[in-house]
Amino acid sequence: MPLLLFAVLLGIVQGLTEFLPVSSSGHLVLFQQVFGDQITGLGDHVAFDLVLHMGTLVPVLVMYRSDIATVFRDLAGSGPAMKRDGLRLAAWVVVGSVPTGLIGILFRETFKQLFTTTLTVGIAFGLTAVLLWRTRALAEGVRTIQEMSWRHALFIGLAQGVAITPGISRSGTTIAVALMLGLRRDLAARFSFLLSIPAILGAFVLEAKDFDFASAHDLAPLGVGFVAAALSGWAALILLLRLVRSGDFSRFAYYLGPLSAVAVAYGLLGPKGWF
């Protein structure tokens, strides 16, 4: 497959799986198993992965630009800070980011090892499927941002930290936990994706020292991958928000269940076991 076309394919996969609750990192593991040589041809895979993640940050910033603007407006407002929706939302994003950051820093190497294990990824896919399926039985949440507490933010942040594990969907886990805590559907999705902003930026900072553009053949694959991830991510984000609002969030379990079985079988049997 031509290098640029492959970069576009990976960008599309990253954009779709970053927002749809199916785990982008888990899918990347599977792609590495199948297309390992071509991924190597892209040069520094750390740089390429991070560029794709930055591409998926663009739809979040565009979609939630009004919330971000509200935060800055509320900074100049008057009255009790926690009575202002924008500042309250920003405060809970900070609280939720703390456990995510600590887990990412303390267990970074452990997660890197998990990143190469197809069997572990398959099991994680199954856990995500069970979590998504569990949301079917939930009554619609009623908690607004003013009724959301630091404890809710902390639990959701812990869920995001656990979702560093390949195969555990970040969006799926955080939204599911938010729904289980009784948050309104729109708030559950909004908080999940606003919480992803510091997580993506933090991961970029942690891995920035490994950036090696010189190892890439040229910058074109990085550029087209970034654009593909941003555009496909925008489409996936719109689709997911519609499904969360309509209560159809659990349907992705139908995809992850069989995928989990295939990944586990591949991990146990290896490539030769399929022939």
Image (spheres, helix red, strand yellow):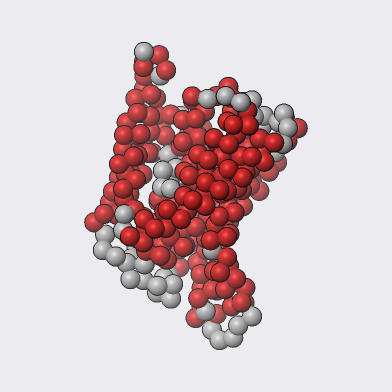
Q: What residue do we see at 54% from left, 73% from top?
A: 86
Q: What residue do we see at 58% from left, 43% from top?
A: 228
Asked if 167 appears above or below 237 in the picture, the reply is above
How many numbered discs, if any?
0
Asked if 192 appears above or below 115 in the picture, the reply is below
As drawn, the residue found furthest toward the bottom would be 79
Along the horizontal axis of the image, is 273 left or right of 49?
left
Q: What residue do we see at 50% from left, 66% from top?
A: 92
- Residue 168 vs residue 57, the one in the foreground: 57
Q: Is residue 155 visible?
A: no
Asked if 138 appears above or below 144 in the picture, the reply is above
Asked if 82 appears above or below 190 in the picture, the reply is below
Along the horizontal axis of the image, is 216 left or right of 105?
right
Locate the C terminus by quadrant.
top left
Image quadrant assignment for residue 147: bottom left
Q: What residue do we see at 37% from left, 39% from top?
A: 125
Instruction: Give x and y (percent) for residue 146.
Output: 43, 76
Instruction: Give x and y (percent) for residue 250.
Output: 31, 50
Instruction: Give x and y (percent) for residue 136.
Output: 26, 54
